Amino acid sequence: MSFDRARVLVFTMMTLSSVAVLAQETSYVQTQDLVYAQPHGIGLLMDVFVPKGDKNGLAIIDIMSGAWHSDRGKIKDHTRSQTFQIFCQKGYTVFAIRPGSITKFGALEMRDNMNVGIRWVKDHAKEYGIDPDRLGLTGASAGGHLASLTALTAHDETTADGKKATTGDTRVKAVAVFFPPTDFLTYGKTPESPNGSERLRQIARRLAYPDRMTEPSTDELIQLLTKISPAQLVTEKAPPFLLVHGDADPVVPLQQSEVLMDALKKAGIPVELVVKKGGGHAWLTIHEEVQTIGDWFDKHLKD
């Protein structure tokens, strides 16, 4: 099943329960379509969800991307999953950042767009009454991939010699993601050569080298895929991770969360994996796992 077909399925599943969700009084005030950057003259947008009730002085950045597309439909999907409702009930301010779509940007460009978005949030922390050093990062599917990629390649605000980095500080304190693609070199239980899989070729072409006119060599392709594979990029500087994945996911194998978990454990990074029995690429009761993520952020961001 393709990412696009899976998105249609998820949309249909969420629609079945959307009437009850929309009937709830929202726990937030929503500001739509704030421009946080303009690469290539293209406005990159975010929505901000501010709690109506007590604020806890903390924020969660939610990456709006499905099949590496970031149209407003992703905001609706996360509304149906009660993401903003649950997080804002807990007092979190939520920044729903749209990093651009695969039709224009490669994975590393989307990662760079996310870095700009994170810096925007930190620069406006005082305005929203949040702590810029205690940000949570989340996302689902392609959004989970970009969240993991962004967090694991984050820029520190200081360099090794103590000087301030020109890129700014893009670190977050904790990451919690749903069913993320994490390793394009071993996608599934059976490792396969990148040159031998048409599926991996398509992913690589659109995400890893969107502007190239010619096919890279096998060695070049491996290098390109490595650069967009979070599981290949783990270091001892990584933040704590929570991974949530269904064991019946037909689109992103559970193995993708397992391989990232193994890499994080090897680096000594705290990591938890919640396996949803019978869970596909999203499920009707996913709001329960959103609540689990909210509780996990409470533990890791309030310290």
Image (tube, rainbow, N blue to C red):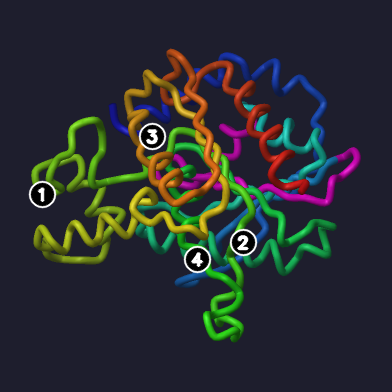
Q: Which residues are magenta?
A: 52-79
Residue 42, numbered label: 4
Instruction: Quickly name the residue at label 3.
Output: 258
Q: Nearer the viewer, mark 1 or mark 4?
A: 1
On the picture, is 210 further left or further right than 132? left
Could you classify mark 2 by the number of other residues whose Cα lies within 10 Å: few (under 14), some (14-19), or many (20 or more)? many
Instruction: Quickly name the residue at label 1.
Output: 195
| Residue at x 14%, y 40% (from the top left corner) | 192
Secondary structure under tag 3 reads helix
- Position in image of residue 96 (x %, y %): 63, 48
Tell me if I can see residue 81 in this picture.
Answer: yes
Q: CA distance from mark 1 to mark 2?
A: 35 Å
Whichever of labels 1 and 3 marks the residue nearer the N terminus, that label is: 1
Whichever of labels 1 and 2 marks the residue nearer the N terminus, that label is: 2
Q: Is residue 117 above or below residue 101?
A: below
Instruction: Quickly name the residue at label 2.
Output: 118
Residue type marked 2: Ile
Q: CA distance from mark 3 to mark 2?
A: 27 Å
Q: Nearer the viewer, mark 3 or mark 4?
A: 3
Tell me if I can see residue 73 in this picture.
Answer: no
Q: Is residue 4 above or below residue 216?
A: above
- Position in image of residue 198 (x %, y %): 14, 41
Q: CA distance from mark 3 to mark 4?
A: 36 Å
